[in-house]
Amino acid sequence: MSDQNPVFIPGPTNIPDRLRNAMHIQTRDHRAPDFVETFAPVLEDCKRVFGTETGQVITFPASGTGGWEASICNTLSAGDTVLVARYGMFSHRWIDLCQRHNLEVQVIDCEWGSGAPADLFEQALKADTEKTIKAVLVTHNETATGVKSDIAAVRRAMDAASHPAMLFVDCVSSLASMPFHMDDWGVDIAVSGSQKGFMLATGMAILGVSQKALAAMETATLPRTFFDFRDMMAANASGGFPYTPPLQLIYGMRESLKMLLEEGLDNVYARHFRLAEGVRKAVEAWGMKLCAQSPELYSDTVSAIYVPEGFDSNELTEHAFNAYGVSFGIGLGEMNGKAFRIGHLGSLTDVMVLSGLASIEMAMADLNYPIELGSGVRAAQEYYRATAAANQ
Ligand SMILES: Cc1ncc(COP(=O)(O)O)c(C=O)c1O
């Protein structure tokens, strides 16, 4: 089996050679005076990716889940109420994490395949006349269903309700791949990780934190040690880390930010849209359906695709792996067995996407799916030909 094949899971993503090389370094002393020269620009450049000038970037050696935990335990106290909608596996897991921290979680259950219900948030916030809701939690890109939510609409709903709750957004599978505007959207904490849009190994939780959230930190009483923003910020201010940093990842992060900013964030977003659109053309040609219920919800980083009635999506992903050495995302939670996912984010080109579409088509044909071999690839090829830079 070739380890040259790209992965088509929605993270961790393919790591480009430039970033693998950047992380391939001998140990350096993180207490030496030159550590700050590597680390400080990482924090500064991340602000551009989050779209914040007034917020602070805080990182931890953790995955995105650690970022969720850090957002909660630094700003809230046991018994505080949070408002959150569940429309996929990741919004569900964030809810679970809040419940385990003894928060009162007001859950709005939505159909999987839909997005954050700004109108229902507005109603719930208007009904909260005592202002007990301390934070609204939203998953920007629900990786389980391939649904992107409208964060600006959630902010408008919060403003329309004149509610002072903080807005926390999970952008684990959207940051550095789809537009994110932390300041414009009034996001108080944005949670992400190193292994998706940043094209790195897993291991760094990356958070954008507003001044309002930093103020909430002063009165919040949930226990925190490893994830204490205050310790991290104090150490960062003097150029260091409160404990041993994930050094190789920080070097990788430095290079990743260079790559993203060299390409230009708008170009990064446009590339992801174009790659995703090619996948969507293929899905249409196969006569199959996306889990995302309508075009404004379509994610540019992952497509979750229902298999036809009577087929098992786990058999498909397993067969694609065993027969062709190519990984696709399995269906998570309610989608298990019913849908598979094509991750199309991070370090990816149209040529790579075409190889993924060709591989899954072969796997579908092997399992007697009612598709015509080549039909999806052809639809994507036509779209990529028509939109290739050379053709513009
Ligand atoms: C939207 C979203 N949130 C949170 C997570 C959890 O992040 P991690 O697996 O890095 O802990 C993921 C992981 O895929 C995700 O896609």
Image: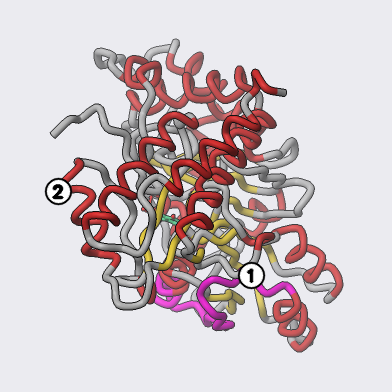
- State how far apart marks 2 and 1 are (Cα): 37 Å
Seen at 36% across and 77% down, the residue is 309
Circles 2 and 1, Cβ within 8 Å, touching? The answer is no
The location of residue 262, given as percent across then percent down, is 61, 17
Note whether 244 is above or below 287 in the view shown.
Answer: above
Q: Which residue is mark 2?
A: 322
| Quadrant of the image occupied by residue 385 | top right
Q: Which residues are magenta?
A: 96-118
Q: Which residue is mark 1?
A: 116
| Figure quadrant of the N terminus | top left
Note whether 355 is above or below 342 in the view shown.
Answer: above
Q: Is residue 33 visible?
A: yes
Q: Indicate yes or no whether the magenta region holds residue 116.
A: yes
| Quadrant of the image occupied by residue 316 | bottom left
Seen at 67% across and 22% down, the residue is 391
Seen at 72% across and 23% down, the residue is 392
Task: Please give left or right for residue 226 compared with residue 126 in the image.
Answer: left
Q: Indicate yes or no whether the magenta region holds residue 37.
A: no
Dot 2 crowding, Cα within 10 Å, few <14, some 14–19, many 20+: few
Note whether 392 is above or below 57 in the view shown.
Answer: above
Type of the residue with mark 2: Asn
Note whether 204 is above or below 157 in the view shown.
Answer: above
